[in-house]
Image (cartoon, grey):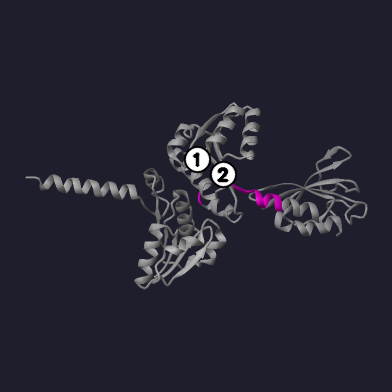
Amino acid sequence: MNIILIGGDQTTYFLAREFLSQGHQVTLINRDPEDSRIMYQKLKATVLLGEGSDPETLEQAGARSADVLIAMTPHDHDNLVACQVAGLQFELPRTIALVNDPENESIFQDLGISVAFSATRIIASLLNQQTRFAAITHLMTLGQGQISLTEVLLSASSPVAGKTLHEIDLPENFLVAAILREDVVLVPRGPTRLAAGDKLILVGAQADFKTILKQLAGE
Amino acid sequence: MYVVIVGCGRLGTLLADGLSVAGHDVVVIDRHEASFRSLSPEFSGFRLTGDATEYALLKSAEIERADCLMATCSEDTLNLMVAQVARHVFGVACVLARVHQPAFGAIFKNAGIEIISPTQLALDAFRERLDAGATKRP
């Protein structure tokens, strides 16, 4: 893939390095001369000194043929406009923006950005998930945080241990996608009987997770 | 009219003073409190210190009630963002943004906001004077 990355901090650098090691082509845009020099010395990537929202700079960066643009500066307005210019002027198919104010996440999507992500929200939700129940590992969220993929370890005291999925009245918008039992992956069906020590991989609406966790963990 | 002005620099100050004296309800927003010192003693509107790209700040300015929002900061990207949020999230009918980079005019022409480009205005004025001078010459 051909990736344009806008930003100058450590995260941008390591992200560029990661993409390069995966075999992608990376072009960096950065407004700071010193940051640009360091990036150029350390990475096998094209580094452009300039504004990520400037149409000329984007043109030079190959916005016409790029597959994705990622804007990660500390300024929401710079990230928004860079993504919009890339989309409107260069018809770049996929634009991703970091939002610093979590409330801008949905606003950016309304304004035509393919994906807007908030580091604040991701870290806050990880922390919430981790501290609430020890036996629950939050794996990832999808669809702007609305869908959650979560692993739950069933303890011996779990009210559902020993029951089949048929017998448990799971909420409608939840799915037990897989069960890990002593390193064996089971794809669960109705008659599958749950046992203490099972790790359940759950997919469902983030908002309703509390209900199902209570049911499974008995807390 | 209820007018929200974002940026209290030279343009923002003149707009805020003039509209306030003309009897409009004016709120002027700037990141730095010191910027408000340039407002005239006759200014009777509100001063709001903060970052206009923060949703909560625009909400506290009751921007959904505004008849017009004017984005006059020195940064084009900031004006473009605030103007689009005012238009599409808060439904403000009249949104004006000062944008220096002439290329943005064409790119954002369908964004529902009105872009005022100092470069374009100067260009038009220069051309107009030139054309007027050329026709006057005997």
As drawn, the label of residue A52 is: 1
Secondary structure found at label 1:
loop
Secondary structure found at label 2:
loop
Residue occupying the point 85% across, 55% down: A217
Image-quadrant location for residue A20: top right
Residue occupying the point 59% across, 54% down: A101
As drawn, the label of residue A73 is: 2
Label 1 and label 2: CA atoms lie apart by: 9 Å
Q: Nearer the viewer, residue A60 or A192?
A: A60
Q: Position of residue A10 (x, y in %)?
A: 64, 39
Q: Nearer the viewer, residue A214 or A66?
A: A66
Q: Quadrant of the N terminus of chain B?
A: bottom left
Residue B126 in sight: yes
Q: Quadrant of the C terminus of chain B?
A: top left
Name which of mark 1 and mark 2 comes first in the sequence.
1
Asked if disc 1 and disc 2 are in contact, CB closer than 8 Å, the reply is: yes
> Quick check: do tags 1 and 2 share a chain?
yes
Chain under label 2?
Answer: A
Task: Report the span colored magenta.
Answer: A111-124
Residue occupying the point 65% across, 28% down: A21
Residue A1 in sight: no
